[in-house]
Amino acid sequence: MIDTHLHVWARARSSYRWLDDAPESLRADHSLEEGLAATAAHGFDRAVLVQADETLDETHYLLELAATDPRVAGAVCYLPLEDPALVVEQLPRMRATPGFVGVRNLTHDRPDADWILGAAQRRSLAYLEEFDVPLDYIAVSPRHIQNLTTLALEHPGLTIVLDHLGKPPVGLLTEYDRWADQLAEVAALHNVIAKISGIYPAPPADLNAPVTAEQMEAILTTVLATFGPDRLMLGSDWPMGTVAGGTDAALSVLVAAVDALDSDQADALRQRTATRVYRLQP
């Protein structure tokens, strides 16, 4: 089973400034060995590393890990989308680097929710489309999801991977319905893939509690009906789940919900979609 969303960080390798305001348990280094051990306990045997800092130093760090540990299936790395000249300079080299499978920016951390729609960013996305490199996209608000629709329509040849299902507002019924409606619109665009990952209770719920089995089953039913299994993949979001009820609780609920599916659906979520979208080696 492939974990398509595992974070690691070493603060000696990159700045990770956002960690200064993060819960204390996240501020320490989180190693590849720790992450793989935590997720292996729930059946994951390979992982795609996903960027957690906007520096090329971290990009090089992730690619080093991908080159040295066969359990790393690939790495979604940072390139500065606001600098299309650098993106087009780096992409051929990155594309030829073993382990490089995609690009991501911390879109959700920017004050401007429309940052991704900037002219420079769109030129960079056109280069990703040209070089057939997937974009991982973080959406934590309805505006972010709306912008995803705009980008997917403007760049029909660009594969866009929606991280964390666009953050479903678990426990907030009226907002949940709006999220489900927006997700159905996004799912109608066939160049969008979605990760079932990083699903936690929404404020004002207890943020230290895991999502319940019933909530996870409802989310899975919703996304299977809209995306279908071959456009869905699983991710642990380790170590972020360590502050949302704990990794074991979160992954137990997720894996149990997938285990309840028929074998073809479960296989797509466990590995088939990720292998195709990120072009992973078997």
Image (cartoon, helix red, strand yellow):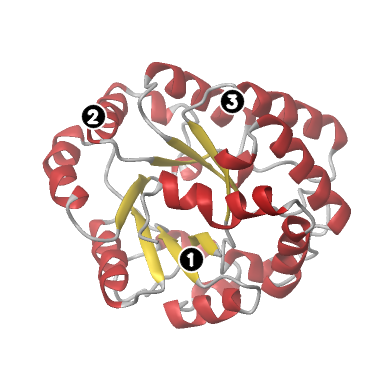
Q: Position of residue 52 (x, y in %)?
A: 42, 58
How far apart, in angstroms, are the residues tagged by discs 2 and 3? 22 Å
In the displayed structure, 6 sits above or below 79; it is below
The residue at 34%/24% (across/down) is 118
At label 2, the amino acid type is Glu
Residue at position x 59%, y 64% from top? Answer: 240
Q: Which image quadrant: the N terminus?
A: bottom right
Instruction: Give the side of residue 249 with respect to residue 234, left or right.
Output: right
CB under 8 Å between discs 2 and 3: no
User: Number of marks in the image?
Assistant: 3
The residue under label 3 is 186
Q: Is residue 126 left or right of residue 50?
A: left
Name which of mark 2 and mark 3 comes first in the sequence: 2
Q: Is residue 237 above or below residue 190?
A: below
Name the residue: 72% across, 54% down: 200
- The answer to which image quadrant residue 256 occupies is bottom right
The residue mark sitting in front, 2 or 1, is 2
Q: Earlier in the sequence, mark 2 or mark 1?
A: 1
Per the image, the residue denoted by label 1 is: 20
Say left or right for 47 vs 79. Answer: right
Task: Give the spatial CA distance, label 2 vs label 1.
Answer: 37 Å
